[in-house]
Amino acid sequence: MSRGRNTELPIDNVRVAAAARLLREARSALFITGPGLSAESGLPHYRGIPGLTRKNPGDGKLLEAALSVDTLQRQPELTWRYLLEIDRRVSAVTPNRGHQILALLERGLARTTILTVNIDRLHQRAGSHNVIEIHGALHDLLCPRCEISTHHEQYGELPIPPLCATCGAVLRPDMPLFGEPLPADAFTRLQAEIELGFDVVFAIGAAAMPPYLARPLLLAKQDGRGTVEIGEKATDISEIVDIRLRGSPMRFLEQIWQEIAASAGAEPPR
């Protein structure tokens, strides 16, 4: 007995079309991005810091201890050994198609914001401008004594550990080390954006959803705004969002972008 032809679209296609519709109808969007997006550029991750396993071969110290402010003060060479390895991994990769699509969406919407836990600046390298780095950035170095901040494309040209040219103190990345609070400036910027409001909020490649990442999604849901989660693994907000796409963030962003272009009857820009 023939079962007949199934004319229903696969569920992911329906969800992709729904996510694309939310973006077509939006004037503003918040994209919350995590290490799952950078992983598709070739950056394996541990707790949002790409390129390291839990233990570094040769010393056996936990990553949290080596990348703590106490170790930086007592054994700066050890902390900088880890930072140099992160730098090597980050400097070796380029933005992927997912990063590029978020930059393209920035051009098409009246207002977009990226809230990222990633420290690699791949969003900016792809062309995004309004990026809130809630965990800071790897290649901005800060003197803890002079409070002078300098940007470096990579660490290869620096002595390890690098010293402040003004006072001789050991420089550190301008990002929270383990055991330190997250930067207040980033939260101030985020709160200002939340007060303006967003028509749609996406979470993309987030490995976990701590309160400061979940809050914008929960507020959007409360206000009846669209909410979307894209990623390989379920998180605490997976059962709350309107649309859940489980799989490659880069692949689903490409499909959403193609759907937006198809509905406009145009060839999608790249």
Image (tube, rainbow, N blue to C red):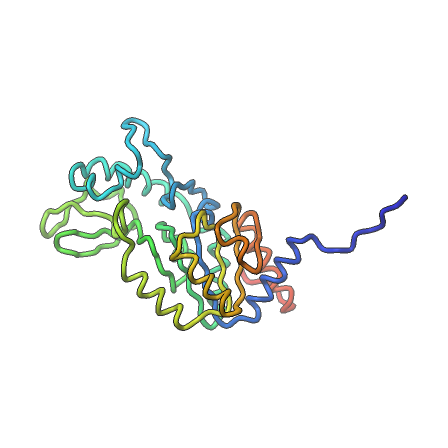
Residue 198 lies, with reference to residue 77, above or below; the image says: below
Residue for point 36% across, 37% down: 52
Farthest residue in the top direction? 58
Viewed as shown, does residue 108 lie left or right of 17? left
Could you say where residue 181 lies in the image, as x and y percent from the top left? 27, 52
**Tag count in the figure?**
0
Specify whether residue 160 is in view: no
Residue 132 lies, with reference to residue 251, above or below; the image says: below
Farthest residue in the left direction? 167
Q: Looking at this view, is 123 or 195 the one in front?
A: 195
Position of the N terminus, as image quadrant, is: top right
Q: Looking at this view, is 168 or 267 the one in front?
A: 168
Residue for point 34% across, 56% down: 134
Specify whether residue 102 is in view: yes
Residue 23 lies, with reference to residue 99, above or below; the image says: below
Residue for point 27% across, 50% down: 176
Q: Looking at this view, is 175 or 94 the one in front?
A: 175
Residue for point 21% across, 44% down: 69
Viewed as shown, does residue 267 lie left or right of 236? right
Could you say where residue 204 lies in the image, as x and y percent from the top left? 48, 54
Q: Looking at this view, is 258 or 119 the one in front?
A: 119
Residue 27 lies, with reference to residue 125, above or below; the image says: below
Could you say where residue 19 lies in the image, as x and y percent from the top left? 58, 61
Could you say where residue 57 lies in the image, as x and y percent from the top left? 32, 28
